Amino acid sequence: MSDFRLRQIHLDFHTSPLIPDVGAEFDKKAWQETLKLGHVDSITVFSKCHHGYSYHPTKVNTMNPTLKFDLLKAQLDACEEIGVRAPVYISAGLDEKDAVEHHEWLQRHKDNWMEEPDFSHAGYHCLCFNTAYLDKLIAEIEEVMELYNPCEIFLDIVGERSCYCEKCRNDMAALGLDYNNDDDMEKFKKQVYRNYLDRCEEAVHKHNPNTTIFQNSGHVSKGRRDLIDTIDCLELESLPTGGWGYDHFPMSAAYARTQREEFLGMTGKFHKSWGEFGGFKHPNALRYEAALSIAQGGGCSIGDQMHPEGLLNKATFGLVGKAYSEVEAKEPWCKGAKYIADIAVLAGEALSGRNEGGLSDTGANRILLETNRLYNFIDLEDDFSKYKMLILPDVWKFDESLKERINAYLAQGGKLLISGVSAVDENNNFCVDTGLKFIGENEFRPTYFIPKFDTVNGTTEYLMRAKNYRFENIDAEIISDGQNPYFNRTAEHFCSHQHAPNDRSLTYPTAAIKGNVAYIGWDIFAGYAEYGDYHIKELVAYAISRLMGDDFTIESTVPDRGVTTLLQQGEKKIVHLLYAHTTKRGKDTEVIEDVVPLYNVDVKVKCDEPKKVILVPQMEEIDFTYADGKVSFTVPKVEIHQMISIE
């Protein structure tokens, strides 16, 4: 995309028809001044919202009954005058007006498709793209293209959904499919969604082939390139306080950047999540979240919600401006910069197109993030040879194709870390030379880990709640042992409050290294995601360090809650160092408030000998040394985010 913007606003405007004087206070000059206050260069504006009403005159839908003018055109014109990009939003999967008027268009669920729809509670109802609703939606899209010719159409609340409405059941029967069969439903819903995607693309591009389309499903599914290929610019919805948490976006970005050169990290100005009026997060939180987006190689999108009167809240855009003024100053070192990765995680989510990774992917992401490693998440279509090391967390059962590819990668010098049943075939044999003989799942749970290397708390027995797998050693180096409890906890056999202690009568190997391959005999990544024991991270980090040796592209002394990334921009290498102190507020909301600076952060980067090392955007040169192919320097202070240009 030639007009990619790094400082975007996603402006929600889901407005009930019961609210009077919608848009009455809109003022072009005030709109423009407020956008400038926020240092905004792109804002998504609404054609149609979840309530189902349009915000412009329409022949194919109904304009919000209390709106008296073309609000969409007024917003588009105001943006164009000041050079602000303005994608147009259309609610696709939700249209409450049509849901009430056309029950036959509703998505029906398997367990209640015969029941009358329930409209007794506040909220929206999903519509089915296999009904006449799709024809109406396509007409709405075409009308927007004809009237306004926008730069982008943003379609929301979409995806492959199982539906048991009368139309879907009849159409499945006509195709010889059984709607009670889950595999048949899986096949049919993909056909329905593909038809929706094709018709949207035709509706947009026959009017303007340069208009981009974004289909928002809330998540970019790893391994579903057939869906990703329908999206021009990926927008990664990840509101940390809205349930995603602060480690979700780095994992989402770690895959998105392998699929698109340009992508957005979408957070929100809200204390919690979408739909808040009067909800604000601390400016330091938004400063960190915007910095995290550019540090991962993306642009920024901040969610807001406009008051029905048509006014942008100046306090909100003052908040946004504190983050975006910093992004604007840093943009010269962000445009065209590409993330550098040493390690690739073959995402469990990409396994056969099903989300089987789950906790295993999450655990791998957290360990790599907390140990400040450079990594991507990849799928089976990626080129393994681009990475120094592959991690296959917990779940990867090999077929012949993957076996051949992994062994070819190892033959070229690649490093491999596997765990659980990864690299085990259908006959329970390792598909790579681990120097081990796989036995199978341990009947005991939990088990105990005994390291053969230095750990923070020394050599002792550490509790491992994750599923354990037994193996025999043939010719590998054992890096950890294990023991079972005396018995599994049952009504007849229990000890103390939780589990039985370790039984020292039997000690067996639990992790090993042979050549370029390390194997850990637990679902260790899922275990870290679920329980977070520090010794789990120690074991994984030790295995990674043993395999990688001195071949990490970057190392830093940023602590575990910090983030270290490295991007290439032409002949420059751009280091990003981030740190923010998070606190739990309320029941489950992780917030950022105080700035806790880091001082004298040591950084070492593998690169050609530089001419200078500069703190940017401050343009302050700092001292460095160069030896053994690495530049070393100390960053005096990191206050939320510091960039360093190695030139």
Image: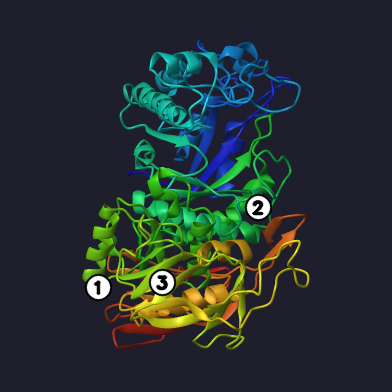
- CB atoms of marks 3 and 2 within 8 Å: no
Q: What kind of element bears circle 2?
A: helix
Above or below for 457 versus 241: below
* Residue named by callout 1: 413
Q: Which residue is drawn at 41% across and 53% down?
A: 255
Query: Label 2 is placed on what type of residue?
Result: Thr
- Can residue 331 be seen here? yes
Q: What kind of element bears circle 1?
A: loop
* Residue named by callout 2: 241
Q: What kind of element bears circle 3?
A: strand
Q: First in sequence: mark 3 or mark 2?
A: 2
In this image, 241 relative to 600: left or right? right
Q: Residue 418 falls in which quadrant of the image? A: bottom left
- Can residue 260 be seen here? no
Residue 130 pos. (x, y %): 47, 19
Q: First in sequence: mark 3 or mark 1?
A: 1
Above or below for 230 versus 579: above
Which of these two is toward me, 474 or 136? 474
Query: Label 1 is placed on what type of residue?
Result: Gly
* Residue named by callout 3: 519
Query: Label 3 is placed on what type of residue?
Result: Tyr
CA separation in Å, label 3 and label 2: 36 Å
